[in-house]
Image (cartoon, grey):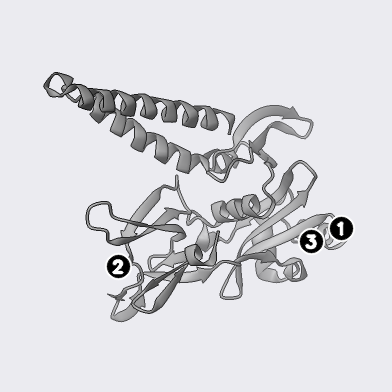
Amino acid sequence: MSDSKKLKLFEGKQIPLGVYRHYKGNQYEVIGFAKHSETLEDMVVYKALYGEGGTWVRPLSMWDNPIEVDGKTVKRFEFAGMEMFQDIKQRITEPEVGVIISYAALDGSPEGVAKEAEMYLSSDMLNFYGWVEDNRVVGICGFEVHSDKVEIHLISVAEDRQRQGVGGAMVDALQKMYGLPLEAETVEEAVGFYRKLGFSTTAFQHPEWVEKYTCILRANAGFTTEELAEAHRALLSTLQKCEKIDIGKMGKSQRTMLERRIAALKLALTLIEKETAEC
């Protein structure tokens, strides 16, 4: 993507692509810009990095306009940077990082966390990255890069930042960094996290557990499962509207154009359904 597409000027201000924090705490990623088809107004295209996600648009003029909250003036969306996911192996022994590790480690005791940290520090193959906000580590991810996949060994989020998109943002960052399928093993209590992000999950028996799950997220052409679902809903809605049009009141050329449009929409839906099934 060219630099001109990474930044948008509005009243002399640059609006970069990347992650933003909403004043209420949730995170969003600006993925592009568009124009309103009727008014030609500049719009920001962004997606939620929490819950089930979803892609949205907002007028550029309303993007970072100041608003008043509890008597203070703040921006609606504050740029959080494009490099929030970074190597923090040198910080792995910090107490705050240890607490986050304890939420996901098999042994969450101080001794177990210390062994986990030593395993990463003593291995050149194991990577330990974190989601960092204002120098505070709010999420951690331990992973190993293979020739054909990225294997996630550990992923966890600070208690006060859970369910705000940090985990999903780390997964998204891994996809963009390596462009490889992501794979993880987890237990029943955590498998929902991976399913929400579009991972396929397969249960298997483990010697030390009643049941575990292999979770796989296939590398694709840059579209997440949530984005494909959003596109499918929009196209299906358009198709349903087209099929309700009374062609008896249309001329021959208009009917032909409508039939071609319906055929194109059906083809697009089929392709999206095929892509989603392979994710």
Query: How many angstroms separate mark 3 from mark 2 (CA)?
Result: 44 Å
Image side of residue 259 versus residue 279, left or right:
left
Q: Quadrant of the N terminus?
A: bottom right
* Residue identifier under label 3: 117
Residue at the extreme left: 249
Query: Helix, strand or loop at disc 2?
Result: helix
- Crowding around mark 2 (Cα neighbors within 10 Å: few <14, some 14 to 19, many 20+) is few
Q: Amino acid at mark 3?
A: Ala
Query: How many angstroms separate mark 2 from mark 1 (CA)?
Result: 47 Å
Q: Answer above or below: position of 255 versus 32.
A: above
- Crowding around mark 1 (Cα neighbors within 10 Å: few <14, some 14 to 19, many 20+) is few
Query: How many angstroms separate mark 1 from mark 3 (CA)?
Result: 10 Å
Q: Quick one: 156 or 115, which is closer to the camera? A: 156
Q: Quick one: 255 or 207, which is closer to the camera? A: 255
Residue at 71% x, 51% y is: 105
Q: Which mark is residue 123?
A: 1
Q: Is residue 124 visible?
A: yes
Q: Position of residue 25 (x, y in %)?
A: 43, 65
Answer yes or no: do the residues labelled 1 and 3 have beta carbons within 8 Å?
no
- Labels 3 and 2: the sequence-earlier one: 2
Which-is-in-front pick, marks 2 and 1?
Answer: 2
Residue at 44% x, 74% y is: 14
Q: Position of residue 2 (x, y in %)?
A: 54, 62
Answer yes or no: do the residues labelled 3 and 2 have beta carbons within 8 Å?
no
Which-is-in-front pick, marks 1 and 3?
Answer: 1
Q: Amino acid at mark 1?
A: Ser
- Labels 1 and 3: the sequence-earlier one: 3
Residue at the extreme top: 248
Residue at 73% x, 46% y is: 150
Q: Which mark is residue 62?
A: 2
Query: Helix, strand or loop at disc 1?
Result: loop
